[in-house]
Amino acid sequence: MGKKFRFDRYLPWALLCFSILFSVILYARYGQNTLDADQSSEFVLADQLNHEHALISRNWYYSTELRTVSPVIIYQLALSLFSSWHAARTFSVFILSVLCAAAFLYAAKKAGYGTEAVYCSACFILPFSKTQSFLFAWGCFYSMYFILGCILFGLIVSFQEAHHRILHLVTLSVLSIWAGTAGIRMFMIISIPMVLSCFFEWVHSFRNTKVQSMGDIKWHSIASAICLLSCCIGYLINIFLFSPIYSFRKYDTLFTGSFSIYDLLDRFDALLHYFGYAADVPVLSLHGGISFCLICLSFLVLIAPVSVLKKDGPAPRRRIVNTFAISAVLFVWLIDSMTSGYIAAPTSVGYYIMGLFFALFSVFVFIRQTFGTTKWQSLFSLLLVLVFYGNTISFIQRNVPLHEKQQSTAAAWLLKNGYTHGYATFWNGNLLTEYSNGAIDVILYDTWRSREPYEWLQSAAHLEALPEGPVFLYTDTEEMELDPSPCLSSGQLIYEENSVRIYLFQDAQTVHSTQLNQYL
């Protein structure tokens, strides 16, 4: 019995450690083949911030948010330790994976759970789909949101038992204000779903006279309200204090639209693809079998929180894990289904990724409730984790090429020939900088019809002065089909491989007077 107990106790921790190691090894091997312009812009920003010795910059065009809550600070640390940007990324993936797992385990412990959370962490650490690898496991865009959200969740559910409640309150308020400065994402990830969860708990307590822990519900509600109010203060700071100083776009391009059940179903389809479902694989194959399991998993993730709540009615601090999962997913689904002005699926999963991981957590709780012995609980939990491992391998095989991206080969050629300043569209420029370990400085344009550099995820210095000496213009055949460039003659062509075309100009002024102003 002693050996079985030790096996059951250490199995989830072994799986979690292996998941982190497996993800990092995969990234070290394949990560450079999955990069895109958005990911590279984070590292270009981190490199600029290191040169400025700052955490945020006035000399950078941000996207729809000021990166006050982001992995960029981890990237800054990594770039100060490694000269290779790929090594720095691999290090960052490791650090952020550990922090995400630790934050989630903290939140689960404060809610009264243990082993189930370790199994769950072993799953969501993995890059089990293209969307997951981009948003969380490797791209890390939502890692810091998730870490901060889990810390806030833990502070909220442990508010009643805090020994130093004033200090607890101050910590919750300060972290929530910080969360609010990042924009609307933290409202959707943690603060609004927590308030909704408390509302559901009050409704449950009024309908169920057997509820004994009304104190927990009361304190959860107070803490959730403080979190939401503090987030609002942070958001006001974002709008009225940061907005006039820093360059970032606000969410003023979003519009409400008519609600459609079909839009809601589209969100479920996005959920399927988030988990890695593939519609173009043979049914009788490993990939087909995994895809079928993922369909079942998607339904189970949505059903499990409700089932756990109805099965044995756990204490409020345990119930709130499940009501939070339901609230976070459904709230964002409804908001997302009635909003237009940006591309929703599949990356909109990021807005409820924390609730989704808590829903996955409920699946492991459901396994514990369903199977009475530790032996069977461990077996079925292990099988679920193995599905995620299998899906990760399937994703790598199907979606991650074994050859270098075209920008990587081009960047190596440019460096070898001494060309370090040039022009490219957004989708290519930051990648050239990353693949050259920051040696190539690229001015970004939205399209070649643009009159000025793109005020989006690049240095503001690119709009202030022209680079000196010879400059290149990087483009590809698809761009040329959309924006034909008659001024780019074969005599200026210095590099051609696959769809990539690189042209050389003697100085930047020539580029502006010919290529970039040809559509006047």
Image: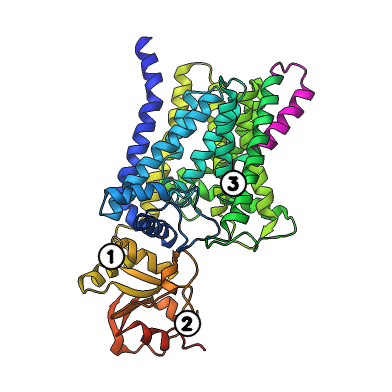
Give the residue drawn at x 35%, y 41%.
Answer: 94
- Name the chief secondary structure element in magenta: helix
Q: Pick whichever, 458 or 446, lies toward us.
A: 458
Q: Are marks 2 and 3 in contact (CB under 8 Å)?
A: no
In this view, 319 is above or below 356: above
Callout 3 amino acid:
Gly
Q: CA distance from mark 2 to mark 3?
A: 40 Å
Q: At 65% across and 40% down in the image, what residue appears?
A: 228
Sequence order check, earlier mark of 1 and 3: 3
Residue 401 seen anywhere in this rendered image of the structure: yes
**Quadrant position of the N terminus in the picture:** top left
Is any atom of residue 387 visible in this view? no
Q: Position of residue 305 (x, y in %)?
A: 62, 32
Q: Which residue is mark 2?
A: 483
Label 1 sits on a secondary structure element that is: loop
Mark 3 Cα-neighbour bin, 10 Å: few <14, some 14–19, many ≥20: many
Which amino acid type corresponds to the residue marked 1 in the rendered image?
Answer: Ala
Q: Coloring scheme of the render? A: rainbow
Label 1 crowd (10 A; few <14 / some 14-19 / many >=20): some
What's the magenta region?
A: 194-213
Please report the residue visible at 69 percent of the width from the left and 20 percent of the height from the top. Answer: 215
User: Where is mark 1, residue-wise?
Assistant: 439
